[in-house]
Amino acid sequence: MTVFFAFADLTWPETAGLARETPLAIPLGEGFELAEVARALGHPPAAGLLPAIPYGWEGSSLAAPPALFAAYVGNLLGGLREDGFTRVVALAPPGIPLPLPDEHILRIAPAAPTPPLSLPPPAGRVLLIPIGHTEQHGYHLPLSTDTDIIAAISRGVAAAAPEQTFTLPAYPYGVSTHRRSFAGTLSAGGRAFEDFWLGVLDALVGRGFRRFYFLSGHGGNCSFLTTVVKYAGERHPGIFCATSWLYLSGPAGVAALEKHRRSAIGGMGHAGELETSLMLHLRPDAVHMQRVVDEVDFISTPSYYMDWVEGGALIANPPWENDTATGAYGAGSLATAEHGRLWLEAAIAEKAGHVDEISEQHRRREARRSKKP
């Protein structure tokens, strides 16, 4: 009997220790019968299921052009093959156009197809588009950390303002430009990421949506989302599309961090005090505090250093392993679930404030445009 495991619940050392002949599958949607998947894979002893992709393919509730989606998924699969895994597939319903090599696709009809995404009437709403990632977070946090956190923030904002906003499901894959440094880190590729999300925006604008907020739970996504937002504004002048640096990065958010943090600057870079606290609040069962290793020896200079809100005038991307042996930047040992609760509330409040601003920006710009002859 095949034992299926959730790939994203692993830490990177556990991923590094997997037998490379272990099959790995990225499902397009939900509802696949595991017994049928096991049969199609040849009944291996174990197989890993990566986070399901909630939309994007033709036939899903929200599709981008097939070539754009295939490039996104192909890069994810390619990274796993580069890591040495010999059987890596996209688990896809039959009949959908997915221009990838046949050996990279396992076509199985879902026993219970993913329910269609029920989008609300677009008028006056800000559509939240949360994007996390599947990547290493030190010895103690799961690969799903970025997705788990941004999903919770986005749900919280939507619950706080149900008439003003609506959230799409969190997308579990983004961009890592340090993918090879530690096991378990995937990447959709920067250009494929930008092209895909512009394709998704095209589809949403075609449905009448005009206000968008990209929420990122992963720092590697942020510069590419800035490019998406810039191209979106040029391509669709009547919309207002925005993004921001992660969360807890504005004045009120930074104040909330400073009020409760126990670590010094450098303690919140990655898998440090902040993310560990949030995960202790959201998913304590997935956090291995006994494995925490604090690493705060980032090579810092006045214009380039690492903390949650990256500091200094310089923008650079040195090899990740220059500054960390465990994959973590920060002091995860100082994390507490209570601080995670407080910081989650502050992050939701910050993003809700941004939603108000996006609404006001679009309303006032529409009013100004309507007055022009």
Image (cartoon, rainbow, N blue to C red):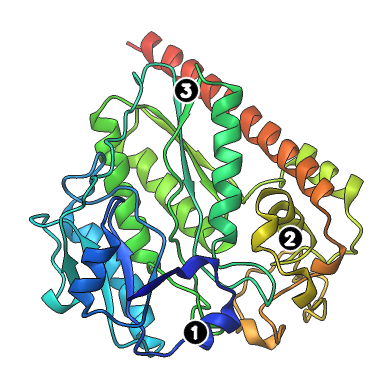
**Image marks 3 and 1: residues in contact by CB distance under 8 Å:** no
Disc 2 secondary structure class: helix
Q: x%, y% of residue 281?
A: 73, 49
Of badges 2 and 3, the one in the foreground is 2
* Alpha carbon separation for disc pair 1 and 2: 23 Å
Residue projecting furthest to the front:
1
Considering only vertical position in the picture, is 165 above or below 314? above
**Which quarter of the figure is the C terminus placed in?**
top left
Name the foreground residue: 211 vs 269.
269
Q: Residues within 10 Å of mark 2 (few under 14, many from 20)?
A: many
Residue that numbered label 1 is attached to:
180
Q: Residue at x 20, y 60 (%)?
A: 92
Residue 325 is at least partly visible in this image = yes
Q: Is 321 rendered above or below residue 242?
A: below
Q: At 45% from the left edge and 61% from the top edge, which residue is drawn?
A: 174
Q: Nearer the viewer, mark 1 or mark 2?
A: 2
Q: Which residue is mark 2?
A: 276
Q: Please tell me which of labels 2 and 3 falls first in the chain.
A: 2
Residue that numbered label 3 is attached to: 362
* SS for dot 3: helix
Q: Residues within 10 Å of mark 3 (few under 14, many from 20)?
A: some
